[in-house]
Amino acid sequence: MIDDGTRGAGLAGTDAATGREARDGADVDVEIGGAALDVHVPRGTVVLAATPIGNTADASARLVALLERADIVAAEDTRRLYALANRLGVHVAGRVVANHDHNERGKADGLLDEVDAGATVLVVSDAGMPTINDPGLAIVRRAIERGLPVTCAPGPSAVLDALALSGLPTDRFCYEGFLPRRHAERVQHLRALKGERRTIVFYETLHRIADAMADLEEVLGPERPMALCRELTKDYEQIRRGTIGEIRQGVEDDPPRGEMVLVVGGAQDGDGDGGETLDVEALAALATRYAQEHDVRIKDAIAEVVAGHPGADGALANKKQVYAAVLAARGGR
């Protein structure tokens, strides 16, 4: 599948950023669709390579060359790596090591010692780009600290695919990864994002999607536009677009399956809390006015005001402390 066109061995030039001599590598011809593509496999370098997120045909020529020619492949799951290689018709000649969330910090320096000695170390996750909610960050940080070269072989990204297909603004967005598992933590996290004006991208699992959608509707309201993107690049790819309320109802009526990305429109005027974080005394004063204007008990007013004014981190003020501040303002009465 690959013809070797070695460009040169040894050292060539100096890296201006690190002061290290830059290592050369090999040029490899990869045949894609009947055409031979020239791919450079660098020596003495960490290479982060994106793998397909569903459709094997999205694998790049660089990924194919790197899988065949890297000295070491650090894979999130070695079984999935070999399964991908089999689908691509690739023989992984280099040493394969497991590099996952639980061991990557301990593995980093050993792998980088190999890089320092001239090896090509390829880092891959199960799907998409390493470091984006996947292992890889530890080795990148240590490589930077040690002045060793790191590069990317870019490719499929569930975040960017979902964003592009959502129909929501793409000029400014933020990626929030997976929402917290627990209800209270998830709600607090969403409160902190209520005033975020950029388009927001989340990952979510099949088992938590119903609870996540209920919390999205509770915190952000039913009218915020969003898209639920599932099984991206696969045969059963589906994009559900609508409001949060419509998507939540759709999840209830027709539960989605597979891997999901949620893309939520940013806040518009009036969607966020609209002001600075209030301290306990300010909340007490606001609750007092609310009780008078709406003719409700002070405790009910405090509950309403506290719920509507989360802190910058999404946490709510302690209602007992607000009540104590109300009594203090009344002179203890």
Image: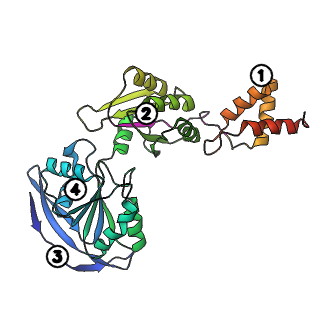
- Mark 2 lies on residue: 208
Q: Earlier in the sequence, mark 3 or mark 2?
A: 3
- Mark 4 lies on residue: 63
Q: Earlier in the sequence, mark 3 or mark 4?
A: 3
Q: Secondary structure at mark 3?
A: loop
The percent coordinates of residue 118 (x first, y second) are 25, 75
Q: Amino acid at mark 4?
A: Leu
Q: Earlier in the sequence, mark 2 or mark 4?
A: 4
Whole-number angstrom distance, CA of label 2 to CA of label 4: 33 Å
Residue at 69% in and 44% down: 277
Q: Nearer the viewer, residue 169 or 212?
A: 212
Q: Earlier in the sequence, mark 4 or mark 1?
A: 4
The percent coordinates of residue 189 (x first, y second) are 55, 41
- Mark 3 lies on residue: 8
Residue 143 bears which disc, if any? none
Q: Nearer the viewer, residue 8 or 259?
A: 259
Direction from residue 62 to residue 130 in the image, left or right: right
Direction from residue 188 to residue 45 in the image, left or right: left
Query: Where are the magenta residues, as a range?
Result: 258-274
Whole-number angstrom distance, CA of label 3 to CA of label 4: 21 Å
Q: Are the residues at dot 1 and dot 3 in contact (C-beta closer than 8 Å)?
A: no
Task: Reply yes or no: does residue 310 show up in magenta.
Answer: no
Q: Nearer the viewer, mark 1 or mark 3?
A: 1
Q: For the stretch drawn in magenta, what is the main secondary structure?
A: loop
